[in-house]
Image: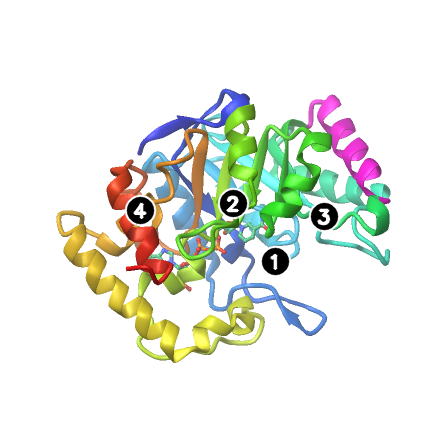
Amino acid sequence: MRKLILGKTKTPVSAIGLGTWSFGGANMVGKHPVGWAGQKDGDSEEVLINAWGNGINHWDTADVYGEGKSETIIGKMWDRVPRKEIFLATKVGWDRGPYSYWYEPKHMLKNLERSLNNLKTDCIDLVYLHHCNFGKDDEHFEGALETIKDFQNKGKTRFIGLSDWSSSRILKYIERCDPAVIQPYRNVMDDDYLTSGLKSYVDKNDIGVCFFSPIKHGLLTGKYNVPTSFEQGDHRSGIQEFADKEIIDKMKHNKVMLKERFDRHPYPEMRGVVDSLFNDCPTGCVLLGQRNKKQVEIASTLGELMTDQDSDWVKSLYRNEG
Ligand SMILES: NC(=O)c1ccc[n+]([C@@H]2O[C@H](COP(=O)([O-])OP(=O)(O)OC[C@H]3O[C@@H](n4cnc5c(N)ncnc54)[C@H](OP(=O)(O)O)[C@@H]3O)[C@@H](O)[C@H]2O)c1
């Protein structure tokens, strides 16, 4: 597995990081599905052991994944995986507790301490502010930043990160937050990381960057033959593209094209869709969700750079230019 330096953290991490959102299982917040149905804890444990064995040393979780379940599964592994060999990241911010807004300092602190306890560690390598919804006139921004910085000053996290689904929102707060690492949404179909100007800021300031949902929760692999629905508590039931025949057909077609182009790779569609994200980001890694041993085996074959020509070809295929 290729290693890269995660920007100003100066820490070597695997090009492919392990996303553990699915470890939390099916989950609802009010009427909204926010989890992944059908996950077995035994599979999650096997994923962690095999990821470590294959050099995937950067693990990403959050306090809200299964309301702490993903963190707890990770925290039980330190008798089988050496804690010091893993770059461990979690997030805080999506659990409001009894408050009507996010990032109430007292509640944040409680959840940060809970993450330490769940993860069974004295210090988490990286803690992100999970999103950039800081309220009207950013009224909760300073409180959130102070709380996470205080946590860092007490030696409970090494680095502070900033995340959001929208790269423009990350860009709006990046200077004031001064994160060591950011976590934006990016895949070959959705790339406001580039168009928002965030990429340019990251490159100039040597910030580490970890792209999430690189295969759009599985959609971009072309593995779905027909429009698909998901069980209760699975967030993919809220994503319209999984139910859109035209998009499903297009993904199947692209899979065939990738098989031709990358025919020397054992998993050509993953090679194309994932590895084309690395070319223009020297401080960047990809957080790939892996639910079982087989998906870890596939992830372990990824992470190598490709030519700019190949990368541009893949991106144009998914932006309907190919
Ligand atoms: N900061 C944030 O707000 C935020 C938001 C989202 C995600 N994240 C992080 O980023 C990580 C990854 O994002 P993601 O889980 O949304 O999506 P993703 O990585 O794009 O997709 C992962 C899913 O694709 C399927 N898959 C994995 N390997 C595959 C393979 N080789 N062939 C076919 N299908 C495969 C699996 O689901 P099936 O087996 O069910 O198909 C897996 O759960 C998360 O786990 C989380 O750590 C962060």
Which secondary structure class fits the magenta region best? helix
Q: Mark 4 or mark 1, which is nearer the start of the sequence?
A: 1
Of pointers 3 and 2, the one earlier in the residue sequence: 3
Q: Is residue 102 above or below residue 286?
A: below
Q: Is residue 163 magenta?
A: no
Q: Which residues are magenta?
A: 139-156
The Cα atoms of the two marked residues, 1 and 4, are separated by: 37 Å
Q: Are marks 3 and 2 in contact (CB under 8 Å)?
A: no
Q: Residue at image x 43%, y 37%? A: 285
Whether the residues at callouts 1 and 4 have beta carbons within 8 Å, the answer is no
Query: Where is residue 174 shown, x and y percent of the image?
Result: 66, 35
Residue in the picture at 82% in, 45% down = 138
Residue drawn at 46 percent across, 78 percent down? 229
Numbered disc in front, either 1 or 2: 2
Query: Disc 4 beta carbon < 8 A from ligand 1?
Result: no
Q: CA distance from mark 1 to mark 2?
A: 28 Å
Say which quarter of the image contains residue 232: bottom right
Counting from the top left corner in percent of width and height, residue 71 is at: 59, 46
- In the rendered image, which residue does mark 4 sit on? 312
Question: Mark 3 — residue?
Answer: 93
Sequence order check: which comes first, mark 1 or mark 2? 1
